[in-house]
Image (cartoon, rainbow, N blue to C red):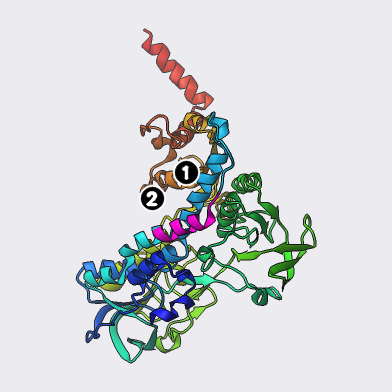
Amino acid sequence: MAAETLAEIPSLTPLDQHNRRLQENVHPPEWVNPAPKPQYDLIVIGAGTAGLVCAAGAAGLGARVALIEKSLMGGDCLNVGCVPSKALIRAARAAAEIREAGAFGVRLQGLVEVDFPAVMQRLRKLRADLSGHDSAQRFRGLGVDVFIGEGRFMDRRSIGIGPQVLRFSKAAIATGARAVDLPIPGLAEAGYLTNENIFCLTRRPARLAVIGGGPIGCELAQAFARLGTQVFLLEQQRQLLPREDRDAAAIVKKALVNDGVEINCCCNIKSIRARDNRKLLALDCPDAASELTVDEILIGVGRAPNVEGLNLEAAGVKYDKRGVQVDDFLRTTNGRIFAAGDICSPYKFTHAADAMARIVIHNALFLGRKRIRALMVPWCTYTDPEVAHVGRYPTEAEKRGIIFDTVMVPLEEVDRAVLDSETTGFLKVHVRKGSGQILGATLVARHAGEMISELTLAMQAGVSLGRIASVIHPYPTQAEIIKRAADQFNRRRLTPRVRKLLGLILSMNRW
């Protein structure tokens, strides 16, 4: 792809020094595709997280590997997802912390000013700094044949890219997903932003409508509000983060409101039209005006699998609106072709794509039998406070007829949280009744994503909640909340009968 056409890729505007450096790493304009080998052990289509892990892992084990990417290596995570969004969220948190400094006895002189162009320039710089790890040059150095261009299946064992034909023993589809187009009358004509182009902004919108109260919508609504934008969050359902614990969602809603976000749930958008460089939304909401005028609209709901252009029919690979169909071993309906990541998984997370790619390497190249159902996948919504979860929710356990108990510890009972003035949150751990086996957990705290891994490890290793009480945690840390939950669980096991028995033992010892 020539350099002058790169503006067609949304995440590469503006073409400043940082985006040019990103371009040189993840879509080099002068890149020359190698001559294909007679046959590859593994061909990977898509160089997002799943594709990169597949390619690097297989090449490191001695396989002949080809990697095909038509757009930007690094995929959503590097270019339009995890990396830029967390850079933006961190800048927004800095602005919020400065405004809240008075509560700590820190007095600031004058107004707090957010330099939005500088915030976005920092975002672009950090993204470019990290892009070397996903670069075409790095993967060529790992022994991978990197092809820049659009790959499509020619038949069940070959892939075409331009005039070249690549033959494979095994292949992996890792083309990911994209933001969906919502069927709202007038939306396309008025114009809108998604995660694929919102990080290209160089001017802060004065008024922003965010459609969708899921993780993307909540994270970016809070971030832009903290950076000075007037934000309106519109959600069709009654609850923000509708898949999460209700108490956790309520805390997030309150936090967003405190940051100035105007939230309207049970809200339908009847139509949108553009007028005088503004966008007018006609609404049907219980607690909102019938019309809302904003400068920009962000779509923060829904993902569609990238199956177009792959010619999957020629390869004998079945797919539907949810993506490529795979079995528990990540095999498609063509036994030589596997899939990993957002193209085939309900878990649309970078870390889930990484884990699935490792299964593909094992099963495709070494006749392994690793199953996706064995994965213990945690996730986190990076609002402030964060909401992290792993395992089953109570409703899922009830549907399976599992009898369970819930241990709940408020964050306000943790000394470090009190000292940090970060007491809004809790830990809920759901355990199988009578055994202490951890079925699932939800943690709400500023650093919940950093703390949930201890519970994930316990679940993966089959460690009961009670045993965690014997693990020494450094004091004071917010992670002590997990030990407190374990202590609370153990205290519950001191039934009157057990207490009576212990009393008899103590009385015997007195003799």
Please report contact status of discs 1 and 2: CB closer than 8 Å, yes or no.
Answer: no
Q: Which mark is residue 447?
A: 1
Question: Residue 355, percent across and down?
Answer: 37, 61
Magenta residue check for 119: yes
Quarter holding the C terminus is top left
Three-letter amino acid code at disc 1? His
Residue 456 visible from this viewpoint: yes
**Left or right of 166 on screen, residue 150:** right
The residues tagged by marks 1 and 2 sit, at their Cα atoms, a distance apart of 21 Å
Q: Is residue 308 magenta?
A: no
Q: Quadrant of the N terminus?
A: bottom left
Residue displayed at 45% across by 37% down = 482
Residue 201, by quadrant, is: bottom right
Q: Which residue, given by chain and number where applicable, does mark 2 sit on?
A: 460
Q: Would residue 161 appear left or right of 204 to someone viewing this image?
A: left
Q: Residue at x 74, y 62 (%)?
A: 292
Q: Which residues are magenta?
A: 114-125
- Circle 1 or circle 2, nearest the eye: 1
| Disc 2 crowd, CA 10 A, few/some/many (<14, 14-19, 20+) | some
| Earlier residue among tags 1 and 2 | 1
